[in-house]
């Protein structure tokens, strides 16, 4: 009788354990609680997304044509996270096979296409926009949050701001500017190239003019047009890396002087705050400003390859705000372009700390044209950070896009943007797959059965 009760109790105990385990699994899969301990917040919605969702005043309908793939599950999980932030998002998961008429209405031909609809306007996010190749083989990044948030912003925006990238002087362009153009467009802007040689003025629809990395001077007429643009309340972003003879560029120097800044033309060396120990790639400290505040909170650094230092023109300090500054151990190498140049501190070199970026704010009414808004500018002592892979180094992207957003006066664009989420796929060769199968499905259960059988046999004989 006692043995019988022991068997019953053991059975009840085992069944209870299994039941508790199943319950935990079910709850964990459906529970709304999520914790993200990553520094960059890869597993939580970005501040930009939350602000966009909270700003919704009308309902946006979302049709997600998902399948059971990893991408499809990421899409569904992300949309559920969006719904927790607002009640203005009506999400519907659609099987295009069961509802072909809806798929046809929005011309959906691929699984994991997501359609956002507000009134008569619609934005379509294709599956190709959701996934980008990762840095390593067989790795992918999921850009769903970036794409979804921008789709919602496009639906609610009254117009798309226009950003012009100045060309004609060796500025960052082509494939080097691909990431810059992509993210500026992703922020809801129209991005156009501008060669002032073919113009009579900076176009009237220019919200921001970007001058990133000229390797030669502007012409007299170009400088006059840009100054007129600023007089009318224009917004300019200038980025410079050291170039041979740049201190003798009279027109660019004149333009910077109008902004209250002088470029030293030196090569900044910072042995204390350097990117992976490279003193020619400073990692400057932030100064408090709207552009930098959230980057400071998240401890996301900016990296400035091939930087030159900036100085205020006497009497202009009132309109300037520092954004980036080197350590005290830094110095500006003034003879870097000489044939026998050595990168080492000399008497003629500029002593740190050195300023690498300024925000320029004119007082209201200082635009020289009647009824003009106050001009604004951001001047950065590195154009290399705009090009290629450097654009995506930690805080560089957000710093540059925040600068553009600040120039536009759009607080929602001065923030931390969505981070690409890893979407990992692993290829397992057939031989290794068979080994894993035999080890986990066959060998382990056999070991447990044999071990249990031995223990049972010994206890029975005892």
Image (spheres, grey):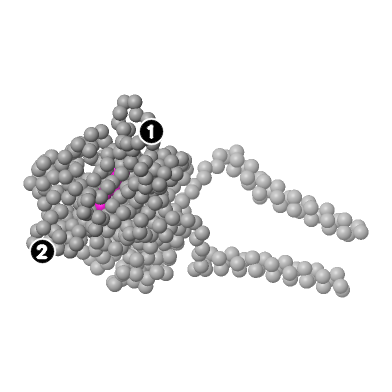
Q: Position of residue 388 (x, y in %)?
A: 34, 41
Depicted 60 relative to depicted 175: above or below: below
Q: Secondary structure at mark 2?
A: loop
Depicted 13 relative to depicted 226: above or below: below
In the displayed structure image, the side of residue 438 where residue 272 appears, left or right: left
Q: Position of residue 51 (x, y in %)?
A: 34, 66
Q: Position of residue 364 (x, y in %)?
A: 17, 64
Q: Which residue is situated farthest in the front direction here?
A: 347
Is there any visible trace of residue 75 in the rendered image? Answer: no
In the displayed structure image, the side of residue 132 where residue 230 appears, left or right: left
The quadrant in which residue 435 appears is top right
**The one of 264 and 198 positioned closer to us in this rendering:** 264
Q: Which residue is situated farthest in the right direction here?
A: 462
Between the C-alphas of marks 1 and 2, the distance is 50 Å
In the displayed structure image, the side of residue 20 where residue 281 appears, left or right: left
- Name the residue at 35% across, 36% down: 347
Q: Choose mark 1 or mark 2, whichever is in front.
A: 1
**Span colored in magenta:** 378-383
Q: Which mark is residue 291?
A: none
Q: Position of residue 305 (x, y in %)?
A: 36, 41
- How many neighbours does mark 1 have within 10 angstroms: few (below 14), some (14-19), or many (20 or more)? some
Query: How many numbered marks does the figure carry?
Result: 2
- Name the residue at 21% across, 64% down: 158
The quadrant in which residue 295 appears is bottom left
Q: Secondary structure at mark 1?
A: loop
Quadrant containing the C terminus is bottom right
Q: Which mark is residue 343?
A: 1
* Residue placed under numbered mark 2 in the picture: 371
- Name the residue at 78% across, 71% down: 8
Task: Give yes or no for residue 195 being in the magenta stretch.
Answer: no
Task: Give yes or no for residue 381 being in the magenta stretch.
Answer: yes
């Amino acid at each position: 009788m006692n043995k019988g009760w022991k068997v019953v109790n053991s059975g009840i105990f085992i069944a209870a354990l299994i039941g508790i385990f199943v319950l935990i699994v079910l709850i964990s899969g459906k529970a709304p609680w999520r914790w993200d301990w990553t520094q960059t917040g890869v597993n939580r919605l970005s501040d930009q997304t939350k602000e966009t969702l909270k700003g919704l005043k009308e309902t946006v309908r979302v049709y997600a044509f998902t399948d059971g793939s990893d991408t499809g599950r990421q899409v569904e999980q992300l949309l559920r996270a969006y719904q927790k932030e607002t009640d203005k998002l009506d999400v519907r998961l659609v099987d295009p096979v069961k509802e072909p008429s809806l798929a046809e209405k929005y011309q959906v031909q691929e699984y994991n296409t997501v359609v956002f609809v507000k009134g008569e306007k619609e934005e379509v996010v294709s599956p190709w926009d959701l996934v980008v190749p990762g840095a390593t083989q067989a790795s992918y990044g999921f850009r769903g949050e970036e794409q979804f948030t921008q789709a919602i912003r496009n639906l609610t925006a009254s117009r798309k701001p226009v950003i012009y990238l100045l060309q004609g002087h060796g500025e960052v362009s082509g494939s080097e500017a691909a990431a810059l153009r992509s993210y500026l467009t992703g922020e809801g802007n129209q991005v156009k190239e501008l060669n002032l040689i073919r113009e009579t003025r900076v176009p009237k629809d220019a919200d921001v003019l970007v001058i990133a990395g000229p390797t030669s001077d502007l012409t007299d007429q170009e400088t006059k047009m840009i100054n007129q643009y600023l007089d009318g309340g224009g917004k300019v972003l200038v980025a410079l890396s050291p170039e041979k003879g740049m201190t003798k560029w009279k027109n660019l120097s004149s333009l910077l002087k109008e902004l209250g800044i002088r470029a030293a033309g030196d090569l900044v060396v910072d042995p204390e705050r350097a990117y992976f120990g490279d003193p020619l790639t400073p990692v400057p400290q932030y100064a408090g400003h709207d552009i930098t505040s959230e980057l400071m909170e998240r401890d996301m650094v900016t990296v400035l390859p091939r930087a030159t230092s900036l100085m205020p023109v006497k009497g202009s300090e009132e309109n300037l705000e520092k954004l980036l500054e080197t350590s005290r151990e830094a110095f500006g190498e003034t003879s870097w372009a000489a044939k026998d140049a050595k990168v080492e501190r000399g008497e003629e070199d500029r002593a740190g700390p050195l300023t690498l970026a300024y925000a320029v704010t004119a007082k209201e009414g200082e635009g020289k044209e009647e009824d003009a808004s106050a001009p604004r500018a951001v001047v950065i002592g590195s154009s290399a950070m705009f090009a290629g892979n450097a654009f995506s180094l930690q805080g560089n992207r957000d710093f540059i896009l925040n600068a553009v957003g600040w120039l536009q006066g759009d607080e929602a664009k001065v923030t931390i943007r969505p981070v690409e989420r890893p979407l990992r796929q692993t290829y397992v060769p057939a031989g290794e797959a068979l080994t894993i199968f035999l080890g986990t499905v066959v060998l382990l259960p056999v070991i447990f059965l044999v071990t249990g059988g031995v223990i049972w046999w010994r206890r029975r004989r005892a």
